[in-house]
Image (cartoon, rainbow, N blue to C red):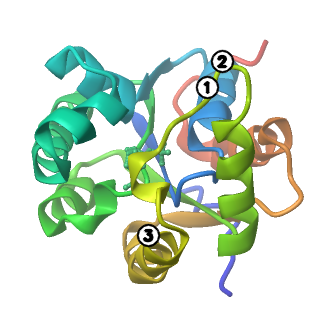
Amino acid sequence: MNKVEGMPASAAPLQRIVLTGFMGSGKTTTGRLLAERLRWAFLDLDDEIACRTGFPVPEIFARFGESFFRREESLALAECLTGRQVVLALGGGAPEAEGNRALLRGTPHTAVLYLEGAFETLYARCLAQASAPHAVIRPVLADASSARHRFTQRTPLYAEIATATFDTEGHSPEVLAGRIHKALRFNIPAVKTP
Ligand code: S3P
């Protein structure tokens, strides 16, 4: 697997850092920690969709179906990408739509970071999160074999849009946020270190 840990120092200064990857890759936790380090805003695409629709994600799936969720996801993505100094955690399925990938590729001053892991590791993390006190419910994980199929279909799409890829296996979100911060430090205007 190709791991790119860093970006050319000459790249244009970043205004948006987008985290992509399958469910359970730590996009939300790592993104929040990274935003804290940078003192940037943190946005989670699922939360933005919940705000737009007035329903939490599992309820959107249950009431209106996946295609409605995907339409709202594309609209929320376009809105989030207008922000500056923003770390944005995507939902695992956001890169499936070609329009979303084109938008991510075409948005200037934006790094898309792929948080990578093996299906077994990520699936096990999701199962653990589903039975944790503040359970994270993911409707698309209801069936393990279709979840694996989605993983296989999506892996090349994550790689296609990625500016850089970070291996999440055996790394805590704290460690990952630190590695990302270090890798991007030359591309972030006026980084304010605590
Ligand atoms: C989904 C991932 C979820 C959420 C929704 C669908 C997917 O986000 O958007 O349940 O299709 O992979 P996370 O990747 O943050 O769990």
- Which element carries disc 1, helix, strand or loop? helix
Distance of mark 1 from mark 3, alpha carbons? 20 Å
Q: Amino acid at mark 3?
A: Tyr
Identify which residue is drawn at 66% across, 18% down.
36
**Mark sitting earlier along the chain (3/2):** 2
Q: Is residue 77 above or below residue 6?
A: above
Residue under numbered circle 2: 36
**Residue sitting nearer the eye, 157 or 51:** 51
Task: Residue lying at the far bottom in this picture: please name it.
Answer: 1
Residue 135 visible, this orientation: yes
Q: Could you tell me if the residues under marks 1 and 3 are in contact, i.e. CB atoms within 8 Å?
A: no
- Note whether ligand 1 is within 8 Å of mark 3: no
In percent of width and height, residue 59 lies at 29, 29
- Which element carries disc 2, helix, strand or loop? helix
Distance of mark 3 from mark 2, alpha carbons? 25 Å
Quadrant of image for the C terminus: top right
Of labels 3 and 2, the one closer to you: 3
Identify which residue is drawn at 61% across, 25% down.
32
In percent of width and height, residue 74 lies at 16, 45
- Which element carries disc 3, helix, strand or loop? helix
| Residue 13 numbered mark, or none | none
Of labels 2 and 1, the one closer to you: 1
Q: Is residue 17 left or right of residue 69?
A: right
Identify which residue is drawn at 26% across, 55% down.
104
Residue under numbered circle 1: 32
Q: Could you tell me if the residues under marks 2 and 1 are in contact, i.e. CB atoms within 8 Å?
A: yes
Q: Is residue 105 above or below residue 188?
A: below
Residue under numbered circle 3: 158
**Residue sitting nearer the eye, 190 or 117:** 117
